[in-house]
Protein backbone atom coordinates (compact mmCIF):
# COMPACT_ATOMS: atom_id res chain seq x y z
CA UNK A 1 0.00 0.00 0.00
CA UNK A 2 1.37 3.36 -0.89
CA UNK A 3 0.79 6.30 1.44
CA UNK A 4 1.19 9.61 -0.06
CA UNK A 5 2.30 12.65 2.02
CA UNK A 6 -0.30 15.31 2.11
CA UNK A 7 0.86 18.89 1.85
CA UNK A 8 0.98 20.94 5.16
CA UNK A 9 -1.95 23.11 5.90
CA UNK A 10 -1.66 26.59 4.71
CA UNK A 11 -1.33 29.28 7.56
CA UNK A 12 -2.30 32.73 6.77
CA UNK A 13 -0.09 35.70 7.46
CA UNK A 14 -2.45 36.97 10.14
CA UNK A 15 -2.40 33.63 11.95
CA UNK A 16 1.39 33.49 11.80
CA UNK A 17 1.69 36.98 13.24
CA UNK A 18 -0.69 36.02 16.03
CA UNK A 19 1.33 32.94 16.84
CA UNK A 20 4.48 34.95 16.99
CA UNK A 21 2.89 37.46 19.41
CA UNK A 22 1.67 34.63 21.60
CA UNK A 23 5.18 33.18 21.64
CA UNK A 24 6.67 36.51 22.73
CA UNK A 25 4.08 36.84 25.47
CA UNK A 26 4.88 33.37 26.77
CA UNK A 27 8.59 34.19 26.75
CA UNK A 28 7.97 37.32 28.79
CA UNK A 29 5.89 35.42 31.33
CA UNK A 30 8.61 32.79 31.55
CA UNK A 31 11.25 35.49 32.14
CA UNK A 32 9.06 37.11 34.80
CA UNK A 33 8.55 33.75 36.49
CA UNK A 34 12.29 33.03 36.45
CA UNK A 35 12.95 36.51 37.95
CA UNK A 36 10.48 35.89 40.74
CA UNK A 37 12.07 32.49 41.36
CA UNK A 38 15.54 34.06 41.63
CA UNK A 39 14.20 36.70 44.04
CA UNK A 40 12.57 34.00 46.14
CA UNK A 41 15.79 31.97 46.15
CA UNK A 42 17.80 35.06 47.20
CA UNK A 43 15.32 35.89 49.95
CA UNK A 44 15.37 32.30 51.10
CA UNK A 45 19.17 32.28 51.21
CA UNK A 46 19.21 35.57 53.15
CA UNK A 47 16.67 34.22 55.58
CA UNK A 48 18.77 31.07 56.00
CA UNK A 49 21.75 33.27 56.85
CA UNK A 50 19.65 35.28 59.30
CA UNK A 51 18.44 32.10 60.93
CA UNK A 52 22.04 30.83 61.16
CA UNK A 53 23.14 34.13 62.72
CA UNK A 54 20.21 34.07 65.14
CA UNK A 55 21.08 30.51 66.09
CA UNK A 56 24.72 31.49 66.60
CA UNK A 57 23.64 34.50 68.70
CA UNK A 58 21.31 32.31 70.72
CA UNK A 59 24.14 29.82 71.26
CA UNK A 60 26.53 32.56 72.30
CA UNK A 61 23.89 33.98 74.63
CA UNK A 62 23.28 30.54 76.06
CA UNK A 63 27.02 30.02 76.52
CA UNK A 64 27.38 33.47 78.09
CA UNK A 65 24.44 32.74 80.38
CA UNK A 66 25.99 29.46 81.46
CA UNK A 67 29.32 31.22 82.04
CA UNK A 68 27.59 34.01 83.97
CA UNK A 69 25.75 31.48 86.07
CA UNK A 70 29.02 29.65 86.70
CA UNK A 71 30.73 32.92 87.67
CA UNK A 72 27.83 33.95 89.89
CA UNK A 73 27.75 30.54 91.54
CA UNK A 74 31.42 30.86 92.49
CA UNK A 75 31.25 34.59 93.25
CA UNK A 76 30.83 36.16 96.69
CA UNK A 77 28.38 38.63 95.08
CA UNK A 78 24.71 37.64 95.22
CA UNK A 79 22.43 39.35 92.67
CA UNK A 80 18.92 40.40 93.66
CA UNK A 81 15.89 42.38 92.53
CA UNK A 82 12.94 43.19 94.79
CA UNK A 83 9.81 45.26 94.55
CA UNK A 84 10.19 48.80 95.89
CA UNK A 85 6.95 48.63 97.84
CA UNK A 86 6.13 50.90 100.75
CA UNK A 87 5.01 48.11 103.04
CA UNK A 88 7.69 45.72 104.26
CA UNK A 89 5.58 42.64 103.51
CA UNK A 90 5.26 43.72 99.86
CA UNK A 91 8.99 44.08 99.25
CA UNK A 92 9.20 40.66 97.68
CA UNK A 93 12.07 39.27 95.71
CA UNK A 94 11.54 38.81 91.98
CA UNK A 95 15.05 37.52 91.41
CA UNK A 96 17.79 36.08 93.61
CA UNK A 97 20.88 34.45 92.12
CA UNK A 98 21.31 30.76 92.95
CA UNK A 99 24.54 31.39 94.86
CA UNK A 100 22.44 32.55 97.80
CA UNK A 101 23.10 28.95 98.69
CA UNK A 102 26.50 30.04 100.06
CA UNK A 103 24.49 31.16 103.10
CA UNK A 104 22.53 27.90 103.16
CA UNK A 105 19.33 29.28 101.56
CA UNK A 106 17.41 28.33 98.41
CA UNK A 107 16.61 31.05 95.86
CA UNK A 108 13.18 29.50 95.23
CA UNK A 109 12.19 30.13 98.83
CA UNK A 110 12.73 33.87 98.34
CA UNK A 111 10.94 33.97 94.98
CA UNK A 112 7.97 32.03 96.36
CA UNK A 113 7.76 34.33 99.39
CA UNK A 114 8.45 31.57 101.84
CA UNK A 115 11.53 33.50 103.04
CA UNK A 116 11.88 37.29 103.05
CA UNK A 117 15.34 38.79 102.87
CA UNK A 118 14.68 40.83 105.98
CA UNK A 119 14.21 37.53 107.81
CA UNK A 120 17.91 36.70 107.48
CA UNK A 121 19.17 40.14 108.61
CA UNK A 122 20.69 39.99 112.09
CA UNK A 123 18.18 41.20 114.73
CA UNK A 124 20.73 43.68 116.00
CA UNK A 125 20.92 45.34 112.58
CA UNK A 126 17.35 44.89 111.30
CA UNK A 127 15.83 48.16 112.49
CA UNK A 128 18.85 50.17 111.38
CA UNK A 129 18.82 48.64 107.89
CA UNK A 130 15.07 49.30 107.42
CA UNK A 131 15.43 52.87 108.73
CA UNK A 132 18.35 53.55 106.40
CA UNK A 133 16.41 52.26 103.37
CA UNK A 134 13.38 54.37 104.27
CA UNK A 135 15.66 57.38 104.65
CA UNK A 136 17.21 56.85 101.22
CA UNK A 137 13.77 56.52 99.65
CA UNK A 138 12.52 59.67 101.41
CA UNK A 139 15.50 61.65 100.09
CA UNK A 140 15.11 60.19 96.56
CA UNK A 141 18.57 58.64 96.69
CA UNK A 142 18.67 56.12 93.87
CA UNK A 143 21.97 54.39 94.77
CA UNK A 144 23.25 53.50 98.21
CA UNK A 145 25.48 51.06 100.09
CA UNK A 146 24.85 49.40 103.44
CA UNK A 147 26.84 47.09 105.66
CA UNK A 148 25.11 44.76 108.07
CA UNK A 149 25.14 41.24 109.45
CA UNK A 150 23.07 38.32 108.28
CA UNK A 151 22.36 34.99 109.93
CA UNK A 152 23.03 31.91 107.76
CA UNK A 153 20.75 28.90 107.82
CA UNK A 154 23.31 27.14 110.03
CA UNK A 155 23.22 30.03 112.52
CA UNK A 156 26.58 31.63 111.65
CA UNK A 157 26.83 35.40 111.53
CA UNK A 158 28.39 37.00 108.42
CA UNK A 159 29.02 40.62 107.51
CA UNK A 160 27.75 41.65 104.05
CA UNK A 161 27.86 44.78 101.92
CA UNK A 162 24.62 45.64 100.11
CA UNK A 163 24.98 47.84 97.01
CA UNK A 164 21.50 48.81 95.83
CA UNK A 165 20.22 50.89 92.90
CA UNK A 166 16.64 52.06 92.30
CA UNK A 167 15.35 51.35 88.75
CA UNK A 168 12.00 51.73 86.97
CA UNK A 169 10.88 49.15 84.42
CA UNK A 170 10.46 51.13 81.15
CA UNK A 171 7.53 48.96 80.00
CA UNK A 172 5.52 48.43 83.17
CA UNK A 173 6.67 51.42 85.20
CA UNK A 174 7.14 49.17 88.22
CA UNK A 175 9.96 50.33 90.54
CA UNK A 176 12.54 47.87 91.79
CA UNK A 177 15.48 47.85 94.18
CA UNK A 178 18.23 45.78 92.64
CA UNK A 179 21.92 45.22 93.20
CA UNK A 180 24.40 42.87 94.80
CA UNK A 181 25.12 41.56 98.27
CA UNK A 182 28.81 40.77 98.90
CA UNK A 183 30.21 38.65 101.70
CA UNK A 184 32.77 40.94 103.42
CA UNK A 185 33.09 39.05 106.68
CA UNK A 186 36.87 38.43 106.51
CA UNK A 187 37.51 42.01 105.43
CA UNK A 188 35.30 43.34 108.20
CA UNK A 189 37.07 41.23 110.80
CA UNK A 190 40.44 42.49 109.53
CA UNK A 191 39.19 46.08 109.63
CA UNK A 192 37.91 45.69 113.17
CA UNK A 193 41.17 44.08 114.25
CA UNK A 194 43.12 46.91 112.63
CA UNK A 195 40.83 49.46 114.26
CA UNK A 196 41.35 47.91 117.68
CA UNK A 197 45.09 47.91 117.05
CA UNK A 198 45.01 51.54 115.90
CA UNK A 199 42.96 52.52 118.94
CA UNK A 200 45.45 50.72 121.17
CA UNK A 201 48.45 52.46 119.66
CA UNK A 202 46.58 55.76 119.51
CA UNK A 203 46.05 55.52 123.27
CA UNK A 204 49.75 54.73 123.70
CA UNK A 205 50.79 57.64 121.50
CA UNK A 206 48.36 60.05 123.14
CA UNK A 207 49.35 59.13 126.69
CA UNK A 208 53.11 59.12 126.13
CA UNK A 209 55.10 62.10 127.30
CA UNK A 210 57.02 62.23 124.04
CA UNK A 211 55.85 64.16 121.03
CA UNK A 212 54.76 62.08 118.04
CA UNK A 213 54.68 63.23 114.43
CA UNK A 214 53.55 61.41 111.31
CA UNK A 215 54.58 62.98 108.01
CA UNK A 216 54.34 62.18 104.33
CA UNK A 217 57.38 61.69 102.10
CA UNK A 218 57.68 65.49 101.72
CA UNK A 219 57.74 65.98 105.53
CA UNK A 220 54.25 67.45 105.57
CA UNK A 221 52.60 66.73 108.94
CA UNK A 222 49.63 64.37 108.63
CA UNK A 223 49.15 63.56 112.32
CA UNK A 224 50.59 64.40 115.73
CA UNK A 225 49.77 63.84 119.38
CA UNK A 226 48.86 66.15 122.24
CA UNK A 227 52.35 66.03 123.75
CA UNK A 228 53.81 67.49 120.57
CA UNK A 229 51.21 70.27 120.60
CA UNK A 230 52.03 71.10 124.23
CA UNK A 231 55.75 71.03 123.49
CA UNK A 232 55.52 73.84 120.94
CA UNK A 233 52.50 75.58 122.46
CA UNK A 234 50.22 75.26 119.43
CA UNK A 235 46.88 73.56 118.84
CA UNK A 236 46.51 70.48 116.64
CA UNK A 237 44.68 72.34 113.87
CA UNK A 238 47.48 74.90 113.54
CA UNK A 239 50.17 72.25 113.14
CA UNK A 240 48.34 69.88 110.80
CA UNK A 241 49.42 70.34 107.22
CA UNK A 242 52.58 72.30 108.09
CA UNK A 243 55.99 71.15 106.98
CA UNK A 244 58.36 69.77 109.61
CA UNK A 245 61.20 72.01 108.40
CA UNK A 246 59.09 75.04 109.32
CA UNK A 247 59.10 73.85 112.94
CA UNK A 248 62.90 73.71 113.17
CA UNK A 249 65.17 76.63 114.00
CA UNK A 250 67.10 78.14 111.10
CA UNK A 251 70.42 76.78 112.39
CA UNK A 252 69.22 73.19 112.36
CA UNK A 253 67.09 73.70 109.24
CA UNK A 254 70.28 74.17 107.20
CA UNK A 255 71.70 70.95 108.59
CA UNK A 256 68.48 69.02 108.06
CA UNK A 257 68.04 70.26 104.48
CA UNK A 258 71.65 69.47 103.58
CA UNK A 259 71.47 66.02 105.18
CA UNK A 260 67.95 65.11 104.06
CA UNK A 261 69.03 62.40 101.63
CA UNK A 262 71.34 60.76 104.15
CA UNK A 263 68.76 60.98 106.93
CA UNK A 264 66.12 59.23 104.83
CA UNK A 265 68.49 56.71 103.30
CA UNK A 266 68.38 54.43 106.34
CA UNK A 267 65.53 53.25 108.53
CA UNK A 268 66.34 55.03 111.81
CA UNK A 269 68.15 58.22 112.77
CA UNK A 270 68.60 60.14 115.99
CA UNK A 271 69.64 63.76 116.13
CA UNK A 272 69.22 66.87 118.23
CA UNK A 273 67.54 70.02 116.99
CA UNK A 274 65.79 73.17 118.14
CA UNK A 275 62.03 73.45 117.59
CA UNK A 276 60.26 76.79 117.19
CA UNK A 277 57.40 77.21 119.67
CA UNK A 278 54.33 79.27 118.87
CA UNK A 279 55.40 82.03 121.28
CA UNK A 280 58.89 82.27 119.78
CA UNK A 281 60.63 80.05 122.32
CA UNK A 282 63.40 77.70 121.24
CA UNK A 283 62.67 74.15 122.40
CA UNK A 284 65.73 71.86 122.35
CA UNK A 285 64.62 68.40 121.33
CA UNK A 286 65.94 64.91 120.71
CA UNK A 287 64.35 63.60 117.51
CA UNK A 288 64.07 59.91 116.61
CA UNK A 289 63.25 59.60 112.92
CA UNK A 290 61.98 56.49 111.14
CA UNK A 291 61.34 56.14 107.41
CA UNK A 292 58.20 54.13 106.54
CA UNK A 293 58.56 52.19 103.29
CA UNK A 294 56.29 50.18 101.02
CA UNK A 295 57.17 46.69 99.77
CA UNK A 296 59.14 48.19 96.87
CA UNK A 297 61.41 50.08 99.26
CA UNK A 298 60.12 53.57 98.46
CA UNK A 299 59.32 56.03 101.25
CA UNK A 300 55.62 56.45 101.96
CA UNK A 301 55.99 58.48 105.13
CA UNK A 302 58.14 59.55 108.05
CA UNK A 303 57.48 58.87 111.73
CA UNK A 304 59.21 60.89 114.44
CA UNK A 305 59.25 60.77 118.23
CA UNK A 306 60.35 64.04 119.80
CA UNK A 307 61.65 64.41 123.35
CA UNK A 308 61.69 67.84 125.01
CA UNK A 309 65.27 68.32 126.21
CA UNK A 310 64.74 71.71 127.86
CA UNK A 311 65.40 70.57 131.43
CA UNK A 312 68.22 68.27 130.36
CA UNK A 313 69.81 71.09 128.40
CA UNK A 314 69.57 73.42 131.38
CA UNK A 315 71.46 70.92 133.52
CA UNK A 316 73.99 70.20 130.77
CA UNK A 317 74.38 73.89 130.06
CA UNK A 318 75.22 74.48 133.71
CA UNK A 319 77.70 71.60 133.59
CA UNK A 320 79.15 73.08 130.39
CA UNK A 321 79.62 76.42 132.09
CA UNK A 322 81.47 74.71 134.94
CA UNK A 323 83.61 72.77 132.46
CA UNK A 324 84.46 75.88 130.43
CA UNK A 325 85.39 77.70 133.61
CA UNK A 326 88.12 75.09 134.13
CA UNK A 327 89.74 76.00 130.80
CA UNK A 328 92.09 78.97 130.37
CA UNK A 329 90.14 82.18 129.88
CA UNK A 330 91.30 84.50 127.12
CA UNK A 331 94.70 84.89 125.45
CA UNK A 332 97.96 85.08 127.40
CA UNK A 333 100.88 87.36 126.79
CA UNK A 334 103.84 86.47 128.98
CA UNK A 335 107.54 87.05 128.58
CA UNK A 336 108.54 86.03 125.04
CA UNK A 337 105.35 84.12 124.32
CA UNK A 338 101.86 84.80 123.00
CA UNK A 339 99.29 82.07 123.70
CA UNK A 340 95.63 81.54 122.82
CA UNK A 341 93.34 78.50 122.98
CA UNK A 342 89.72 77.62 122.43
CA UNK A 343 87.45 74.63 122.84
CA UNK A 344 84.04 74.24 121.15
CA UNK A 345 82.06 71.14 122.16
CA UNK A 346 79.61 69.52 119.77
CA UNK A 347 77.34 69.05 122.80
CA UNK A 348 76.88 71.19 125.88
CA UNK A 349 79.83 69.40 127.44
CA UNK A 350 82.62 67.50 125.75
CA UNK A 351 85.74 65.39 126.06
CA UNK A 352 88.34 67.72 124.54
CA UNK A 353 90.77 69.45 126.89
CA UNK A 354 93.43 72.10 126.77
CA UNK A 355 95.35 73.84 129.50
CA UNK A 356 98.21 76.26 130.12
CA UNK A 357 100.59 75.53 133.01
CA UNK A 358 103.35 77.84 134.22
CA UNK A 359 104.85 79.16 137.43
CA UNK A 360 103.41 82.59 137.83
CA UNK A 361 106.16 83.46 140.31
CA UNK A 362 108.98 82.78 137.85
CA UNK A 363 109.49 85.27 135.02
CA UNK A 364 110.36 84.03 132.58
CA UNK A 365 109.88 80.37 133.37
CA UNK A 366 108.91 77.23 131.43
CA UNK A 367 105.46 77.37 129.85
CA UNK A 368 103.40 74.24 129.18
CA UNK A 369 100.50 73.79 126.77
CA UNK A 370 98.45 70.59 126.96
CA UNK A 371 95.84 69.33 124.48
CA UNK A 372 93.86 66.13 125.11
CA UNK A 373 90.99 64.26 123.49
CA UNK A 374 88.87 61.73 125.36
CA UNK A 375 87.33 59.12 123.04
CA UNK A 376 83.68 59.95 122.41
CA UNK A 377 81.95 63.01 123.80
CA UNK A 378 79.24 63.79 126.30
CA UNK A 379 78.92 63.51 130.06
CA UNK A 380 81.22 60.52 130.62
CA UNK A 381 83.94 62.01 128.43
CA UNK A 382 83.61 65.33 130.24
CA UNK A 383 84.04 63.62 133.61
CA UNK A 384 87.18 61.85 132.42
CA UNK A 385 88.52 65.12 131.05
CA UNK A 386 87.95 66.80 134.42
CA UNK A 387 89.73 63.94 136.19
CA UNK A 388 92.69 64.17 133.79
CA UNK A 389 92.93 67.94 134.29
CA UNK A 390 92.91 67.55 138.06
CA UNK A 391 95.69 64.95 137.92
CA UNK A 392 97.88 67.07 135.66
CA UNK A 393 97.43 70.22 137.73
CA UNK A 394 98.13 68.35 140.93
CA UNK A 395 101.18 66.41 139.71
CA UNK A 396 102.77 68.84 137.22
CA UNK A 397 104.96 70.51 139.83
CA UNK A 398 105.81 67.25 141.63
CA UNK A 399 107.15 65.04 138.86
CA UNK A 400 110.75 65.21 137.80
CA UNK A 401 110.15 65.21 134.03
CA UNK A 402 107.22 65.53 131.67
CA UNK A 403 107.80 61.92 130.55
CA UNK A 404 107.43 60.75 134.18
CA UNK A 405 104.32 62.88 134.53
CA UNK A 406 102.59 61.40 131.44
CA UNK A 407 103.63 57.86 132.43
CA UNK A 408 102.06 58.31 135.89
CA UNK A 409 98.96 59.85 134.32
CA UNK A 410 98.62 56.81 132.05
CA UNK A 411 98.63 54.43 135.03
CA UNK A 412 95.92 56.49 136.69
CA UNK A 413 93.87 56.64 133.47
CA UNK A 414 93.97 52.85 133.08
CA UNK A 415 92.35 52.51 136.50
CA UNK A 416 89.70 55.09 135.59
CA UNK A 417 88.66 53.71 132.19
CA UNK A 418 89.46 49.98 132.18
CA UNK A 419 85.77 49.00 132.41
CA UNK A 420 84.46 51.64 130.03
CA UNK A 421 86.83 50.95 127.15
CA UNK A 422 87.58 54.65 126.72
CA UNK A 423 91.01 56.18 126.26
CA UNK A 424 92.62 59.60 125.96
CA UNK A 425 95.11 61.00 123.47
CA UNK A 426 97.39 63.74 124.75
CA UNK A 427 100.01 66.17 123.49
CA UNK A 428 102.04 67.69 126.33
CA UNK A 429 104.43 70.45 125.24
CA UNK A 430 106.73 72.66 127.33
CA UNK A 431 108.49 75.77 126.03
CA UNK A 432 111.80 76.47 127.80
CA UNK A 433 112.45 79.57 129.86
CA UNK A 434 114.45 81.18 127.07
CA UNK A 435 111.67 80.19 124.58
CA UNK A 436 114.21 78.70 122.20
CA UNK A 437 113.50 75.03 122.93
CA UNK A 438 110.42 72.84 123.11
CA UNK A 439 110.08 69.47 124.81
CA UNK A 440 107.04 67.28 124.29
CA UNK A 441 105.44 63.91 124.96
CA UNK A 442 103.06 62.52 122.39
CA UNK A 443 100.53 59.98 123.73
CA UNK A 444 98.66 58.76 120.65
CA UNK A 445 97.76 62.32 119.64
CA UNK A 446 98.19 63.90 116.21
CA UNK A 447 101.58 65.64 115.96
CA UNK A 448 101.78 69.36 116.64
CA UNK A 449 103.48 71.73 114.17
CA UNK A 450 105.95 74.57 114.29
CA UNK A 451 105.56 77.02 111.43
CA UNK A 452 108.63 79.00 110.35
CA UNK A 453 107.39 81.98 108.30
CA UNK A 454 110.91 82.88 107.15
CA UNK A 455 111.46 79.49 105.52
CA UNK A 456 107.71 79.00 104.94
CA UNK A 457 108.03 75.52 106.41
CA UNK A 458 105.91 73.41 108.79
CA UNK A 459 107.82 71.06 111.10
CA UNK A 460 105.90 68.13 112.60
CA UNK A 461 106.56 67.36 116.25
CA UNK A 462 106.36 63.59 116.10
CA UNK A 463 107.33 60.94 118.60
CA UNK A 464 106.30 57.50 119.87
CA UNK A 465 103.62 56.85 122.48
CA UNK A 466 100.27 55.07 122.69
CA UNK A 467 97.06 56.66 123.93
CA UNK A 468 96.51 56.92 127.68
CA UNK A 469 94.39 54.32 129.43
CA UNK A 470 95.36 51.33 127.27
CA UNK A 471 98.64 49.85 128.54
CA UNK A 472 99.46 50.39 132.24
CA UNK A 473 103.06 49.28 131.73
CA UNK A 474 103.88 51.68 128.91
CA UNK A 475 106.72 54.11 129.61
CA UNK A 476 106.59 57.39 127.72
CA UNK A 477 109.60 59.38 126.64
CA UNK A 478 110.01 62.99 125.75
CA UNK A 479 111.29 64.62 122.56
CA UNK A 480 113.15 67.94 122.11
CA UNK A 481 113.71 70.57 119.48
CA UNK A 482 115.88 73.62 119.72
CA UNK A 483 116.09 76.67 117.51
CA UNK A 484 112.61 78.05 118.06
CA UNK A 485 112.90 81.61 116.71
CA UNK A 486 110.91 84.78 117.19
CA UNK A 487 107.86 84.86 114.90
CA UNK A 488 107.53 81.08 114.71
CA UNK A 489 104.09 79.63 115.49
CA UNK A 490 103.30 76.39 117.36
CA UNK A 491 99.94 74.71 116.56
CA UNK A 492 98.30 72.03 118.75
CA UNK A 493 94.80 70.76 117.98
CA UNK A 494 92.34 67.90 118.06
CA UNK A 495 91.00 65.96 115.06
CA UNK A 496 87.64 67.72 115.30
CA UNK A 497 89.25 70.55 113.31
CA UNK A 498 90.59 68.73 110.26
CA UNK A 499 87.91 66.03 110.26
CA UNK A 500 85.05 68.55 110.16
CA UNK A 501 83.00 68.12 106.98
CA UNK A 502 80.97 70.40 104.76
CA UNK A 503 77.59 69.62 103.19
CA UNK A 504 79.30 67.78 100.32
CA UNK A 505 81.12 65.46 102.76
CA UNK A 506 84.54 67.05 102.14
CA UNK A 507 86.92 67.29 105.12
CA UNK A 508 88.31 70.61 106.34
CA UNK A 509 91.72 68.94 106.34
CA UNK A 510 95.10 69.76 107.77
CA UNK A 511 96.31 71.56 104.66
CA UNK A 512 93.49 74.11 104.92
CA UNK A 513 94.45 74.66 108.58
CA UNK A 514 98.13 75.15 107.66
CA UNK A 515 97.22 77.60 104.88
CA UNK A 516 95.27 79.80 107.33
CA UNK A 517 98.22 79.80 109.74
CA UNK A 518 100.55 80.68 106.85
CA UNK A 519 98.40 83.68 105.84
CA UNK A 520 97.94 84.90 109.43
CA UNK A 521 101.45 84.17 110.76
CA UNK A 522 102.26 87.89 111.04
CA UNK A 523 99.35 88.40 113.49
CA UNK A 524 99.14 87.58 117.20
CA UNK A 525 98.03 84.17 118.52
CA UNK A 526 94.43 85.20 119.16
CA UNK A 527 93.99 86.56 115.61
CA UNK A 528 95.34 83.33 114.14
CA UNK A 529 93.01 81.33 116.40
CA UNK A 530 89.98 83.42 115.39
CA UNK A 531 90.80 83.06 111.69
CA UNK A 532 90.91 79.27 111.96
CA UNK A 533 87.62 79.00 113.85
CA UNK A 534 85.85 81.39 111.47
CA UNK A 535 87.04 79.44 108.42
CA UNK A 536 86.00 76.19 110.08
CA UNK A 537 82.51 77.56 110.88
CA UNK A 538 82.07 78.80 107.30
CA UNK A 539 83.23 75.48 105.89
CA UNK A 540 80.91 73.31 108.01
CA UNK A 541 77.85 75.60 107.84
CA UNK A 542 74.67 73.62 107.22
CA UNK A 543 76.07 70.42 108.74
CA UNK A 544 75.89 68.92 112.18
CA UNK A 545 79.06 69.16 114.27
CA UNK A 546 79.95 65.60 115.20
CA UNK A 547 83.09 66.13 117.29
CA UNK A 548 84.59 68.58 119.76
CA UNK A 549 86.99 71.13 118.29
CA UNK A 550 90.05 72.36 120.23
CA UNK A 551 93.01 74.47 119.04
CA UNK A 552 95.97 76.06 120.81
CA UNK A 553 98.24 78.64 119.15
CA UNK A 554 101.60 79.62 120.68
CA UNK A 555 103.74 82.28 119.05
CA UNK A 556 107.24 83.31 120.08
CA UNK A 557 107.42 87.06 120.34
CA UNK A 558 110.28 89.45 121.19
Image: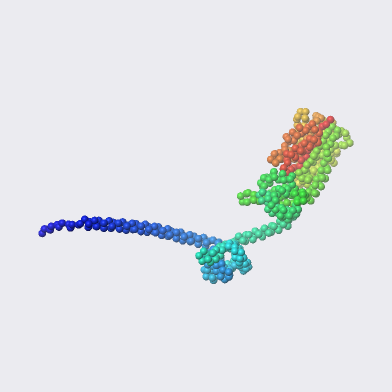
Determine the image quadrant of residue 556. Answer: top right
Q: Residue furthest right?
A: 361
Q: Residue furthest left?
A: 1
Q: Is residue 401 above or below residue 157?
A: above
Determine the image quadrant of residue 184. Answer: bottom right
Determine the image quadrant of residue 521. Answer: top right
Indicate the position of residue 46 as horizontal and vertical percent values. Answer: 39, 57
Quadrant of the drawing holding the N terminus: bottom left
Indicate the position of residue 252 as horizontal and vertical percent values. Answer: 73, 45
Indicate the position of residue 421 as horizontal and vertical percent values. Answer: 75, 45
- Tell which of 499 and 225 is nearer to you: 225
At horizontal 80% and vertical 35% (from top left) the residue drawn is 527
Q: Residue furthest top?
A: 455
Specify whether 81 is left or right of 558.
left
Q: Number of callouts in the render?
A: 0
At horizontal 72% and vertical 42% (from top left) the residue drawn is 542
Indicate the position of residue 557 as horizontal and vertical percent values. Answer: 83, 31
- Tell which of 490 and 166 is nearer to you: 166
Quadrant of the drawing holding the C terminus: top right
At horizontal 75% and vertical 49% (from top left) the residue drawn is 276
Amino acid sequence: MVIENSPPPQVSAEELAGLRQENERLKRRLAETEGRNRSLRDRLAARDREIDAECADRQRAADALKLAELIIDSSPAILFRRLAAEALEDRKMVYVSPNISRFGYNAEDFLAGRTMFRDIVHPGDHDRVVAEIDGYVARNIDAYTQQYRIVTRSGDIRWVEDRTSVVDDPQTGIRYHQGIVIDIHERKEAEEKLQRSEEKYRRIVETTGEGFLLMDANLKITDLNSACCRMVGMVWERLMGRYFLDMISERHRHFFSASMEDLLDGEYHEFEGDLLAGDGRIVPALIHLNALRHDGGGIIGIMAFVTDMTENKKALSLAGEVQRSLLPQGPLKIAGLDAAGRNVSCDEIGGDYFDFLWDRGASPGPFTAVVGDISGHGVDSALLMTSARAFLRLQASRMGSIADLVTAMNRQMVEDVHESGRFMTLFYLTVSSDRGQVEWVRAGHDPAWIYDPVADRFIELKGPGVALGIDPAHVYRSNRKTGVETGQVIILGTDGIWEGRNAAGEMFGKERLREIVRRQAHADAETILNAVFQAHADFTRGTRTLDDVTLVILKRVP
